[in-house]
Image: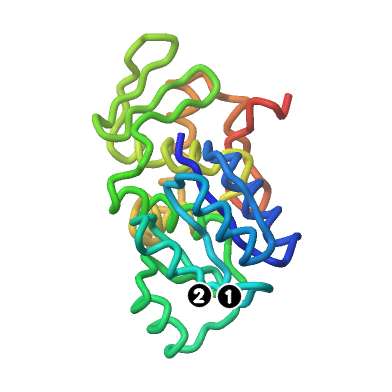
Amino acid sequence: MNKILIVEDEEAIASLIEMSLVRSGYRCEAVNDGITAADRIEQNVYDLVLLDVMLPGLDGYELMDYLRPTGTPVIFITAKGTLGDRVKGLRLGADDYIVKPFEVAELIARVESVLRRTGRGGRVLTAWDVEIDTVARSVTQLGRAVQLTPREFDLLELLVRNRGVALYRETLFERVWGGEPENDTRTLDLHINRLRKKLGWQTKIVTIYKVGYKLEREDAT
């Protein structure tokens, strides 16, 4: 399970990020100032750091001096969204740059992308009675292999990585199909229904009216 450090001085945002990542299967620590972050970075090993720029104590740019020698991947999450700010962050060694406000689904996708790109992505995901091997692209349920099409697998992985989060139809189409189908608006619904049937998850994959779908968390019942 990947360990992520969240460095964000706005406690509400830090809590939102931490809650979203924990629901997606990550271990997280959150700190609210640069000095504490520097101490944690020196004392612990992390798979990823989510770093605000404007922080009390040491700012995000200064913290990069602590992070570069460790080789830890970094994603800046900040309200400083000008081209110059993004270029500065990337030149300092950040792996990605997210501008506030952001969607939770985008944050999770960026985290997954950086972890995969840096060879730190988790290979096996679990949810309820299902285990997903994201490298072999195989699914087992209570030890029994479940045959899924490539689209069904991608859809399942996306739901599991965002469990407890309502995903908009547009987000699901974009992430799984690369864009919303123009002529077949029922494609997503058909794939969801097939997943429910194959996994027996009729009550676990929930329809969110006028939004899309979400996978219930294990602690939601």
Question: x%, y% of residue 52?
Answer: 58, 69
Colouring scheme applied when the structure was drawn: rainbow
Residue under numbered circle 2: 62
Question: x%, y% of residue 127?
Answer: 52, 26
Judge whether 146 appears above or below 112 on screen. above
Q: Give the residue type that dot 2 points to.
A: Glu
Q: Nearer the viewer, residue 74 or 151?
A: 74
Disc tally is 2
Judge whether 57 appears above or below 43 on screen. below
In the picture provided, is 91 more to the left or to the right than 167?
left
Residue occupying the far left of the picture = 136
Say which residue appears at 60% left-offset and 39% top-offset: 23
In the picture provided, is 169 more to the left or to the right than 9?
left
Q: Nearer the viewer, residue 221 or 190?
A: 221
Q: In which quadrant is the C terminus drawn?
A: top right
Numbered disc 1: secondary structure: loop
In the picture provided, is 21 more to the left or to the right than 147?
right
Numbered disc 2: secondary structure: helix
Residue occupying the far top of the picture = 143
Say which residue appears at 45% left-offset and 43% top-offset: 158
Q: Find out whether the residues at labels 1 and 2 contact each other: C-beta distance under 8 Å.
A: yes
Q: Give the residue type that dot 1 points to.
A: Asp
Say which residue appears at 38% left-offset and 29% top-offset: 124
How far apart are the alpha carbons under marks 1 and 2?
5 Å
Decide: few, some or many residues near mark 1? Use Cα within 10 Å; few <14, some 14-19, many ≥20: some
Q: Nearer the viewer, residue 12 or 131?
A: 12
Question: x%, y% of residue 133?
Answer: 33, 28
Decide: few, some or many residues near mark 2? Use Cα within 10 Å; few <14, some 14-19, many ≥20: some
Residue under numbered circle 1: 59
Say which residue appears at 46% left-offset and 52% top-offset: 172
